[in-house]
Image (cartoon, rainbow, N blue to C red):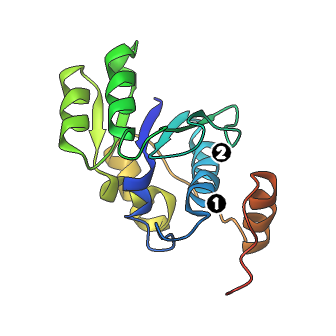
Amino acid sequence: MPYLIDGHNLIGQLPDLSLTDPDDEAKLVLKLIGFVARTGKKVVVVFDHGLPGGKSKMSTHSVEVVFASNPGDADSIMKGRIAKAKDTAQWTVVSNDHAVLDAAKARGMKTVRSRDFAPLLNDTTQRKQVAKRAGGEASDVYVSPQEVEEWLKVFGGKKDNGS
């Protein structure tokens, strides 16, 4: 079951990430890589306003990272992907935007609000509860601060020196 995720909606629901952090997208991608490693699922994450827009170099085999060219266009990109998706019953759409969730439901896709998906990336107990409701399993994966720094280097993020 692949996931189509509104990245900035999800960042806003994660207690350890902030939309004001210049590396927030890279840090979310790292969390999604861990999620993919645990679950074997594929993820497409869409972010508002990235230059030049389109598929990002942060993408991996299992995590496709897409940036909208203009602010606020992530929802349009997600709705376009929902409209074109094949095997819609296999997809889960993660967003807080009612229009995006309604478009997904209309195509027979599963939907999850960002606040309900966020625990899958953080707290072990909540991750297991949410996964159980979704019919799957969750296991513990810990990414150390050193690993985060290494991935940020790979993705071209800046090292946080605590300033």
Q: Residue at x 62, y 63 (%)?
A: 23
Local SS, label 2: helix
- Residue name at image x 57 percent, y 49 percent: 32
Residue, x 61% and y 60% (percent of image)? 27
Q: Which residue is mark 2?
A: 37
* Classed neighbour count for the residue bearing mark 1: other residues with Cα under 10 Å, few (<14), some (14–19), many (≥20): some
Up-down relation of residue 161 to residue 103 (above or below):
below
Packing grade of label 2 (10 A; few <14, some 14-19, many >=20) is: some
**Rendering coords of residue 5 (x, y %):** 42, 42
Amino acid at circle 1: Val
Residue drawn 69% across the image and 31% down it: 61
Q: Quadrant of the C terminus?
A: bottom right
Q: Nearer the viewer, residue 110 or 8?
A: 8
Residue 18 percent coordinates (x, y)? 48, 70
**Residue 128 shows up from this direction:** no
Q: Say if mark 2 contacts mark 1, CB within 8 Å.
A: yes
Query: Which numbered disc, 2 or 1, marks the residue that appears first in the sequence?
Result: 2
Whole-percent x and y of residue 138?
51, 52
Res 120 quadrant in image: bottom left
Residue that mark 1 sits on: 141
